[in-house]
Image (spheres, rainbow, N blue to C red):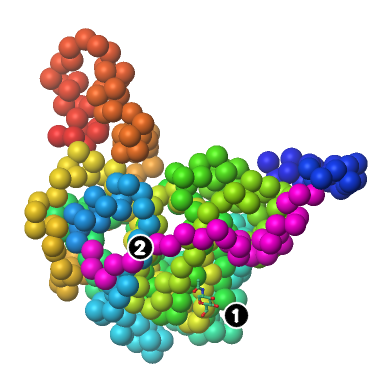
Amino acid sequence: MTFRKNLVSFLCLVLFFNLTECNQNINHPGHLKPFGSSGPFLQLEEVTSLPTKIFFENYVQPKQAVVMRNFVNQFPAFKSWKDEYLYSKASDNDDYKILVETQKKESRDQDTLKLSLTEFLDNYKSRSIYMVNEVPPYLKKDVLLPQPLQCGQAPTVLEETIMWFSSGGTSSVVHTDDYENILCVFDGTKELVLVDYFKHKRIADSIIDEYKGSYSSMDVDKVDYKLFPDIENLEYYRVNVSAGDCLYIPFKWIHQVRSYGRNLAINFWFNYEKIFGNTLFPEECSNNKLDLSKTLDKFTYSASKNDFYSNFKTFIMRQVNLGSRQLNDWISLILGEREFTIEEKQYIEDLLGEA
Ligand SMILES: *[C@@H]1O[C@H](CO)[C@@H](O)[C@H](O)[C@H]1NC(C)=O
């Protein structure tokens, strides 16, 4: 894909460099500037409280991002995660290793290191290293489930809680995630550029040209409009998420992240498909407040099994959730139009989590 784009721009340069078709995009104000530098820009909604039922009905189902201001100020981690505190916790757990990236400007084929958190703390201010790891077990009691994931069945959707820690100055590739994401910042600021995948499907698919990792080959600091001519038709959301704030990023939405200052964040990756069919939250979930007792150490969660049935189920449920297929279509497709036995029915209900 990248090769083909390079070939096209090479041919434009060598053979037809007078032709306007080859050159029209280089006059765009965003050409050779950072991703999302030039608009048009849209405005994200901001909230200061978000009960579970409202979150799932108004944002997760319609796939709409939302900024949550001052959502983690009351988490123990918000006040206590200074270097000295982290050092003292980590030195009792030095055999627990964390994954560390070695380039602040993300490259998907960079080297990674396995360090203890104390080794990381000794070096992160002077070297180009970036912790990207599940919240270590010994720190989980300092972190709460975010308010929108606290009520009813919501905690069961959680898959991973990844901690991002650096001295700032990082930038990610332009990418999409396979999960729904609530990104919460505990120190510093993260600046995000977002694109609504579902509104710009065709262009979005042309940007995400590295299909395996769901990311783009573009240079995020210097976007070449000759290689990505379609992006002049994109609309962007650009938002700063500061210490205390969270942002909901719907799955598949394109995003690019930069960080400023000592930077500590956690993303709460969740899989909405786990509770499909039980999305009717009880009424109490339309006004639940943050419960300070719901710390991460009290929940067990892990990334979905990467087996055939889990993937198949997620695939089906996404199509159902996105409205492109009805669940009944799938059931009749899988079982045919005939009556099915109680065992078959039970099996498919278990498979689809509809019991
Ligand atoms: C975000 O914060 C950075 C650092 O303070 C600043 O340079 C940038 O302009 C801000 N961006 C937005 C969208 O407010």
Cα distance between the residues tagged 1 and 2: 37 Å
Q: Is residue 307 above or below residue 334?
A: below
Name which residue type carries label 2.
Glu
Up-down relation of residue 322 to residue 223 (above or below): above
Residue 56 position, x and y percent, is 25, 52
Q: Is residue 133 left or right of residue 60?
A: right
- Quick one: 144 or 195, which is closer to the camera? 195
Specify whether residue 294 is painted magenta: no
Q: Give whichever of 192, 131 is nearer the camera.
A: 192
Give the main secondary structure of the magenta stretch.
loop
Write down the residue under mark 1. Answer: 127
Q: Residue at x 54, y 46 (%)?
A: 204
Q: Position of residue 7 (x, y in %)?
A: 80, 42
The quarter of the picture where the C terminus appears is top left
294 or 203: nearer the viewer: 203
Q: What mark, if any, has residue 41 been given in the picture?
A: none
Name the secondary structure under disc 1. Answer: loop
Q: Is residue 192 left or right of residue 274?
A: right
The image quarter containing residue 274 is top left
Q: Which span of residues is magenta-colored?
A: 23-50
Q: Is 256 left, or right, of 155 in this rendering?
A: right
Q: Earlier in the sequence, mark 1 or mark 2?
A: 2
Foreground residue, 104 or 5?
Answer: 5
User: Label 1 is placed on what type of residue?
Assistant: Arg
Q: Which residue matches tag 2?
A: 45
In the rendering, at what x and y percent does residue 36 appear?
A: 58, 61
